[in-house]
Image (cartoon, grey):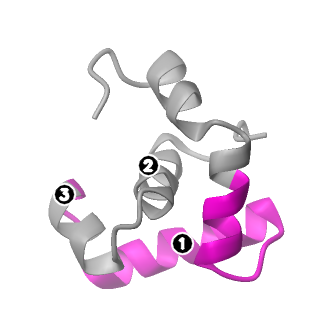
Amino acid sequence: MFDSLSKREVEVLLRISQGYSNKEIGEQLFLSEKTVKNYATNIFDKLNVKDRVQAAIVAIENNIEEYYKRDFSPYFL
């Protein structure tokens, strides 16, 4: 499900699914808010969803936290 996303897109989507705003995500990942918005737009296109709520639902239903922990982070958030 998430294989088409880059590592950074997975990091952004994970935080979207946790309820963080673009500004908060930017602060956590040391990105500008605009860059986070660009990542979010790319995520929406790749997941074929219309907005962050739909993206969060897809992420949660497909267990993005386990995907992130298994494939990207030795230290889970």
Looking at the rendered structure, the kind of residue marked 3 is: Gln
Task: Categorize mark 1 by other alpha carbons within 10 Å: few (<14), some (14-19), many (20+).
Answer: many
Which residue in the protein does label 3 denote? 28
Placement of 49 over or under 57, stated as above or below = below
**Between discs 2 and 3, the one toward the N terminus:** 2
**Between discs 3 and 1, the one toward the N terminus:** 3
Looking at the rendered structure, the kind of residue marked 1 is: Ala
Kindly identify the residue that appears in the image at 39 percent across and 73 percent down. Answer: 36
The residues bearing labels 2 and 3 have C-alpha atoms spaced at a distance of 12 Å
**In this rendering, which labeled residue sits more in front, label 2 or label 3?**
3
Kindly identify the residue that appears in the image at 34 percent across and 68 percent down. Answer: 20
Which residues fall within the magenta stretch? 29-58
Q: Secondary structure at mark 2?
A: helix
Which residue in the protein does label 2 denote? 8
Tell whether 68 sits left or right of 77: right
Kindly identify the residue that appears in the image at 26 percent across and 20 percent down. Answer: 75
Looking at the rendered structure, the kind of residue marked 2 is: Arg
Task: Categorize mark 3 by other alpha carbons within 10 Å: few (<14), some (14-19), many (20+).
Answer: few
**Between discs 2 and 1, the one toward the N terminus:** 2
Which residue in the protein does label 1 denote? 40
